[in-house]
């Protein structure tokens, strides 16, 4: 009788393990969660952390390394977990409870668009963001000539977000992408560039 009970438990465990290896979300329906089953689930799909009843550091780390957005389900965030999350997906920065310069830098270097989630922008963070993606200029709170130049040199389309279009900035943008000539706001400057660059 006891051996039948143990066999049933083992079969149930093995079935649960196979289910979560195929689909981590299946963890939601596992009644007896073991570390091994939870580990298999978050390794298959980091989002499965949402269904883990007893989180450990290792489970959280495996989850955010697989799927940075899983950081939103981490009950006790650490710097290391947040760093792993933003290194996997810069957009995980939006779930970081205590931002540091280093975490923000890792995020914007991964994806410049994540500058929109940075609570305290610095020149260096903005520069890193526009160097990664020029159009991140859209989220720069205090534009400088240098930031705008770096942005349009990386992606001419960033000219669209330049508040004060100067000749030099427009020239750099059009040299990077000739199709942005149409974004130049001043019609006289647009014509001057068209003639100078023979477009």
Image (cartoon, rainbow, N blue to C red):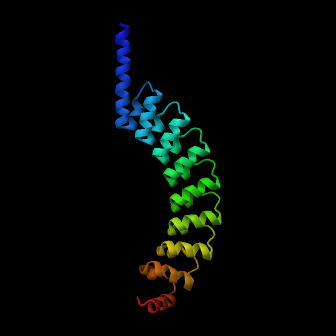
Q: Is residue 134 above or below residue 191?
A: above
Q: Is residue 145 above or below residue 15?
A: below
Q: Place residue 13 in its image quadrant.
A: top left
| Residue at the extreme top of the image, as rendered | 1
Question: 189 or 78, which lies in front?
Answer: 78
Q: Position of residue 141 (x, y in %)?
A: 61, 67
Of the 4 image quadrants, the one containing the C terminus is bottom left
Q: Place residue 162 in its image quadrant.
A: bottom right
Q: Is residue 102 above or below residue 178?
A: above
Of the 4 image quadrants, the one containing the N terminus is top left
Q: Position of residue 156 (x, y in %)?
A: 48, 75
Residue at 54% of width from left, 60% of height from top? 109
Residue at 46% of width from left, 26% of height from top? 34
Q: Place residue 75 in its image quadrant.
A: top right
Question: 26 or 60, which lies in front?
Answer: 60
Q: Position of residue 149 (x, y in %)?
A: 56, 76
Question: 16 or 184, which lies in front?
Answer: 16
């Amino acid at each position: 009788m006891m051996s039948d009970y143990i066999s049933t438990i083992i079969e149930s465990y093995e079935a649960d393990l196979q289910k979560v290896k195929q689909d981590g979300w299946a963890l939601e329906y596992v009644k007896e969660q073991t570390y091994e089953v939870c580990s298999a689930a978050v390794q298959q799909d980091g989002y499965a952390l949402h269904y883990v009843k007893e989180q450990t550091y290792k489970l959280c780390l495996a989850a955010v390394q697989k799927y940075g957005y899983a950081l939103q389900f981490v009950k006790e965030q650490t710097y290391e977990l947040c760093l792993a999350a933003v290194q996997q997906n810069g957009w995980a920065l939006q779930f970081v409870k205590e931002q540091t310069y280093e975490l923000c830098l890792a995020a914007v270097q991964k994806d410049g668009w994540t500058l929109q989630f940075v609570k305290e922008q610095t020149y260096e963070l903005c520069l890193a963001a526009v160097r990664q993606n020029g159009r991140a200029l859209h989220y720069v709170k205090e534009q400088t000539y240098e930031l705008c130049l770096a942005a349009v040199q990386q992606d001419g389309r960033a000219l669209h977000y330049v508040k004060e279009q100067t000749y030099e900035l427009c020239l750099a943008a059009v040299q990077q992408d000739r199709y942005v000539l149409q974004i130049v706001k001043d019609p006289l400057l647009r014509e001057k560039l068209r003639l100078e660059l023979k477009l």
